Image (cartoon, rainbow, N blue to C red):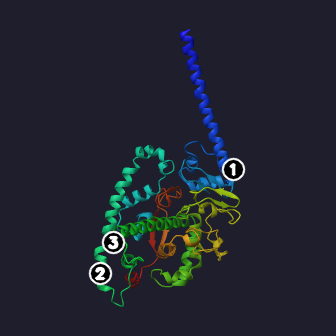
Amino acid sequence: MAEGGLLFGFELADVLVAAVLISVVVLYFHAEALQRRRCPPGPWPWPVVGNFSALGDLPYRNLHKLAGKYGGLMYLRLGVAPTFPSQSNNSVAVALSVDVSHLILPILSLEMTSSVFELLGSVVISDFVPYLSFITKLQGHASKFSKIRDVSDKLTADFFDLDSHRNNYKKMKNDPSYVPDFEDVLMETPFENGTNLPDQDLLKLLQELLNAGTETSSNTSEWAMAELIRRPELIERAQTEMDSVIGSKRLVEESDIQQLPFLQAVMKENFRLHPPAPLLLPHESREPTELLGYHFPAGTELLVNAFAIHRDPSVYDNPDSFDPDRFLARPHVDHMSTSDPYELMPFGKGLRMCPGYRLANTMVALMLANLLYVFDWSLPEGQTEVDMTETIGISVRKKQPLFLVPKPRFELSLESVAEN
């Protein structure tokens, strides 16, 4: 009887545990169904982690695929966090990604910048599911972030050297020929209460601007060259246009860009296919919001998938093909506009679009124009294809750096080099 009673006890316990688990699952799905009743469609979330797995390694591509099933406005739940509504001429190969990065930010070593951008672009699960922070610790993210932060802070302080810059400004500010730079303005412009931005905060702000403007511009230029080297006839068209407009052996200048419509079309097409931040910057609702008949709870995080918008087949024919001519036929589409049209928005739109969009566009245009005007380019001997695999840092970059062989088209004027 004792053994039978014990066995019965175990069986009863198993039944109770199973009943509790089934009840929890039923209650979970019932609560989820009630919450989602007024929300946009989207994939059903798993308990605890929600739709986190739906993001994958390339969230913008995976969300693009999901949009094909659920539509352009989707609702995803990520754990307990906010939710997403949807020097030799031709004998040595040059690593273009390295050289372009050096043009923008020579102070930082490639190893350090690579680590910074890789970490800042990594998906950390505890950001979405806080009680899984032990996974983040096991991955070593915290110690890596701490180390990179310390190195970045030191390099930023050395690079901007606020004390020397401040002293130079005091000496030169009364000179009519002196033009204050951005660092001067940040240091010397007071708040409404008369105080100035503390040096620690100033350096953090400058560091953010430095990081945001480095990888994005270099990656955009690299993607453009990767696309163009696969279509050599496009390089020839760009060179022919610049030969006719510039007409001398000098560097391309900012004032030349407006006279180069094909180069501008190349820029637009590159931004269409390779927006630096394909999900743009996230926004969060501070209070419950109604949109298109749907309800979004307070704290909902909104991500705009520019990658998907730029590949809308109802707007663009053959949307996955690199074809600058599509913008020669659509000159009204302006990625620099703060308003309509919305089919090309690599920098966002409206009052909250990227504050550095004009600088970024100018930098990329000048780099690309001079690379194409001054040099002929070819793939290294024996290479016939370009690996276009993507990976994420701060922005989307090529997983494999682009190696090309340059050959000068002419000897640059020394005066032109000195002036630039």
Select label 3 or label 1 by which is in front: 1
Question: In percent of the image, x 49 and y 56: which residue is there?
Answer: 392
Residue 329 x, y percent position in the rendering: 67, 75
Examine the rendered structure and indicate whether residue 412 appears above or below residue 34.
below
Mark on residue 37?
A: 1
Q: Compare residues 205 and 256 and report the one nearer the observer.
A: 205
What amino acid type is highlighted by mark number 3?
Phe
Q: Which residue is mark 2?
A: 168
Q: How many numbered circles are shown?
A: 3
Closest to the observer: 379 or 250?
250
- Image quadrant where residue 309 sits: bottom right
Secondary structure under tag 3 reads helix
> Sequence order check: which comes first, mark 2 or mark 1?
1
Judged by depth in the image, the label closer to the viewer, 2 or 1, is: 1
Q: Which one is earlier in the sequence, the residue at label 2 or at label 3?
A: 3
Question: Label 2 sits on what residue type?
Answer: Asn
Which quarter of the rendered picture does the C terminus lie within?
Answer: bottom left
> Residue 317 occupies which quadrant of the picture?
bottom right
Q: Residues within 10 Å of mark 2 (few under 14, many from 20)?
A: few
Amino acid type for the residue under numbered disc 1: Arg
Q: Which residue is mark 3?
A: 160
